[in-house]
C-alpha cells in the first residue's frame, strides 16, 4: 500500500483495538542492525539490493527455531541533563542502545540492563506508584522480592496498598520530598541507602508531579538505578527471581558466548541438513 522499496521506519499508536500511524520515515531505524544480528541476516544488504533493483532471493526466518533470545535496551543521558525529568513519553529520549544475547528472555534482559549501566539491586528497593491499576498489577511481584530477601520501602499510599492488599507487612513507609519528616526518600537517596527506585507517576496528581520529579531527579543525581515503567519493573523482578532461583539451586544463570557461538549452531544445522540432502 505504501509502495516503498527498501527500509522504512513506521511508528504506531494503539488503543482499544484502534491502530493509528504516528509517523513513517523513509530510512533505516536503529533496529536494523539489531535484528540483523539477532536473525543472522544482513537486512541492510538486502534493502540495498532491493533499492537498486537487483535480484534478491527470498529469505525465510523462523524465530521459533532460534536457540537464544536477544534484548535491546535504551541508554539515557539524564545524568548529564541538569533538572531534566527522567520519565518516559512518546518523544525519542534515548541517546544510545545496548543489545545482548541470552539463553532466555530473563538473562538477555539483565545482560542488556547491566551493559546499559544499570546496577542490579542487592538489598533496599523503594516503590512509589501512583495509578491504582498499576499498584494492583505489580502486587503479586512485590511478595517475590520479599521472598528473595529484599527490604522494601514505599511512599505512604503505595505502602498502605501493599500492606492491605498483599499482606506485605515488612514494607517500611517513607515520606515524600514535600513532607519534612524522616525517613524521607530524598535523605535516603542522598545517603546512598537505596539500591533501586521504582517510581510510576500519576499524571492526574499535581502534588505527585512535583514529588515524583524530586524523587526521580534525586535518584539520577545520586546514581541510584531508576525504573519508571511498570512493565519494565515487572520484567526486572521476574528476571531477578529467575536468577535467584537458579543460583539457590546451585545452577548457573549467566551464559557467556560470542555472537558467533549464539548463531552458529543454527548455521551448522542448516549446513548439515543441506549436506544430507
Image (cartoon, grey):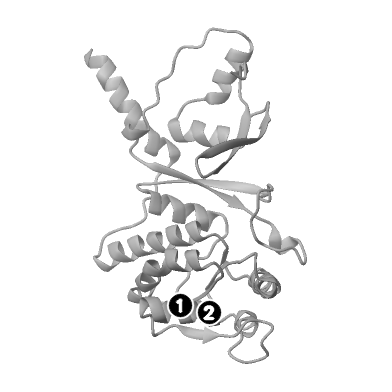
Left or right of residue 160, residue 187 in this image: right
Image quadrant where residue 49 sits: top right
What number is the disc on residue 161? Answer: 1
Q: Position of residue 242 (x, y in %)?
A: 33, 60
- Vertically, is 176 above or below 70? below
> Who's the residue at 67% across and 28% down the image?
27
What crowding class fits label 1: few (fewer than 14 Cα within 10 Å), some (14-19), or many (20 or more)?
A: some
What crowding class fits label 2: few (fewer than 14 Cα within 10 Å), some (14-19), or many (20 or more)?
A: some
Residue beneath disc 2: 157
Furthest residue in direction right, as rendered: 82
- Give the camera-side residue of 63 and 199: 199
> Who's the residue at 39% across and 85% down the image?
169
Q: Are marks 1 and 2 in contact (CB under 8 Å)?
A: yes
Image quadrant where residue 84 sits: bottom right
Q: Is residue 235 visible?
A: yes
- Vertically, is 45 above or below 261? above
Amino acid at each position: 500500500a505504501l509502495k516503498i522499496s527498501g527500509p522504512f521506519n513506521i511508528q504506531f499508536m494503539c488503543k482499544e483495538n484502534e491502530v493509528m500511524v504516528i509517523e513513517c520515515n523513509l530510512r533505516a531505524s536503529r533496529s536494523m542492525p539489531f535484528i540483523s544480528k539477532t536473525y543472522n541476516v544482513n537486512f541492510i544488504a538486502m534493502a540495498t539490493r532491493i533499492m537498486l533493483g537487483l535480484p534478491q532471493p527470498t529469505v525465510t526466518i523462523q524465530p521459533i527455531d532460534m536457540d537464544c533470545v536477544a534484548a535491546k535496551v535504551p541508554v539515557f543521558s539524564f545524568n548529564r541533563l541538569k533538572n531534566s525529568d527522567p520519565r518516559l513519553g512518546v518523544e525519542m529520549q534515548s541517546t544510545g542502545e545496548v543489545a545482548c544475547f541470552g539463553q532466555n528472555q530473563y538473562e538477555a534482559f539483565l545482560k542488556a540492563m547491566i551493559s546499559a549501566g544499570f546496577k542490579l539491586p542487592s538489598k533496599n528497593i523503594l516503590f512509589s506508584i501512583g495509578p491504582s491499576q498499576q499498584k494492583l498489577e505489580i502486587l503479586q511481584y512485590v511478595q517475590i522480592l520479599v521472598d528473595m530477601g529484599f527490604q522494601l520501602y514505599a511512599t505512604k499510599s503505595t505502602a498502605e496498598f501493599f500492606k492491605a492488599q498483599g499482606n506485605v507487612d515488612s514494607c517500611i513507609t517513607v515520606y515524600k520530598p514535600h513532607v519534612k519528616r524522616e525517613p524521607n526518600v530524598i535523605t535516603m537517596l542522598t545517603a546512598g541507602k537505596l539500591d533501586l527506585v521504582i517510581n510510576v507517576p500519576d499524571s492526574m496528581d499535581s502534588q505527585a508531579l512535583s514529588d515524583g520529579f524530586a524523587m526521580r531527579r534525586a535518584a539520577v543525581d545520586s546514581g541510584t538505578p531508576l525504573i519508571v515503567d511498570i512493565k519494565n519493573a515487572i520484567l526486572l523482578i521476574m528476571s531477578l527471581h529467575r536468577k535467584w532461583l537458579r543460583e539457590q539451586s546451585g545452577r548457573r544463570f549467566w551464559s557467556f558466548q560470542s555472537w558467533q557461538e549464539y548463531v552458529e549452531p543454527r548455521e551448522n544445522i542448516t549446513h548439515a541438513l543441506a549436506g544430507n540432502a
